[in-house]
Image (cartoon, coloured by chain):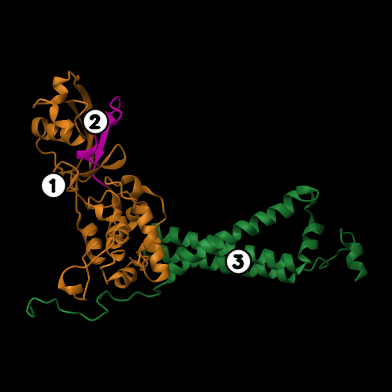
Chain colours: A orange, B green
Amino acid sequence: MTTMTEEPGNPSIEAGIAAFTVTLIIRRFDPETMSEPIWQDFDVEMYPTDRVLDALHKIKWEQDGSLSFRRSCAHGICGSDAMRINGRNRLACKTLIKDLDISQPIYVEAIKGLPLEKDLIVDMEPFFASYREIQPFLIASKEPKDGKERIQSVAQRAVFDDTTKCILCAACTSSCPVFWTDGQYFGPAAIVNAHRFIFDSRDEGAAVRLDILNDKEGVWRCRTTFNCSEACPRGIEVTKAIAEVKNAVLSGRPSIPTA
Amino acid sequence: MSDTATTTVEPPRYSRAPRKARGLEKRAWLYMRASGILLVVLIFGHLLINMFLGTGVRAIDFAFVAGKLANPFWIVWDSLILWLALIHGANGMRTIVNDYARGALRAVLLGALLVATVVLLVLGSLVLWTFDPCIGDTSSGVLAELCGAQ
């Protein structure tokens, strides 16, 4: 473990890294007092190793307690703090300040295409409704062999490995221009999670899910703009997964290795 | 074991009301790919024959077109370009209208698109398949000699 050699404490202070002032311009909205969102700017002292989430915390804790945003684990696992930072969907907890151009203000706003509730918080219900509709759970009616376990080969596991990484942060779906137009499109995240089960050799619900995604608002609304693949904080090849589902719809069944 | 066993629900388990024209989007998507591949060959062939081979773009005049349309091969070639490209374009417009227009506006735009497409297809096909270079007064035209000989 080479990472354990540092002394406890803030490593950036000990290494003598200078703090600098960063300007954040945040799109604020309070449904009780405003009819339209406004942009408000804040100056915060940050270290290069800090993240955008740390800047938001600093504002909320030291400058304006009314700033509202979601975050849970703060370490890129839970997917609560997807937001639009400098025009790109990212997780605030995985975006380092030093990776952004700090000579310019950093623009932070809520993700697009979902109803804005307050500041950086949107109503995620339409997003989760699409997710529920593709039946994101294992459908298996047969008893496992010997009553023990459903055996899967390494190759069979590998075909859907990428899409198991999804944390449902909605960065992909809310970066999709087709989703922005009317919100009827299932969206990349729902298709990615359908892919995870469609291509699972233990699952028997592929035909049902392919029927659902053969809908007018299903995979055929994808225009392969690759916004979703660029937005995904987990590096899932979203557009590729959608293309594989399209192929599965065309041939009627997913192509899974037999062993 | 029996009280904890999962209940088997017979298909169809997906209960959302079936929508009209199921599979239309799939066929439209396939059509765009297939026609796109064909059009690459057809249109580049068309450009090559008309613009580059022989004396190049200066060769195009009434006689050149009349000469091409006297050959059934080029009538079929041009008809394929007409139908494949026009429907390809109309379907592209349809998806854009579906993306950005709602309600009555969508219905009006889709209706106008359908009318325009059908009219253009009929007119284009009519020209290609009933083209006669000798219609009208050709006594001073470039084909006067040829038409007079008929």
Type of amino acid under label 3: Trp
On screen, residue A7 above or below A77: above
Question: Given contact means CB atoms under 8 Å apart, are the residues at marks 3 and 1 in contact?
Answer: no
Type of amino acid under label 2: Ile
Does the magenta portion include A109? yes
Q: Which residues are magenta?
A: A91-111
**Circle number at residue A32:** 1
Gap in angstroms between the C-alphas marked 3 and 1:
56 Å
Chain for mark 1?
A
Q: Is disc 2 in the same subunit as disc 1?
A: yes
Q: Where does the N terminus of chain A fall, quadrant-wise?
A: top left
On screen, residue B114 above or below A85: below
Depth check, front residue: B125 or A89: A89
Label 1 crowd (10 A; few <14 / some 14-19 / many >=20): few
B33 with respect to A58 (left or right): right
Find residue A155 and report its horizontal and vertical position in percent.
32, 59
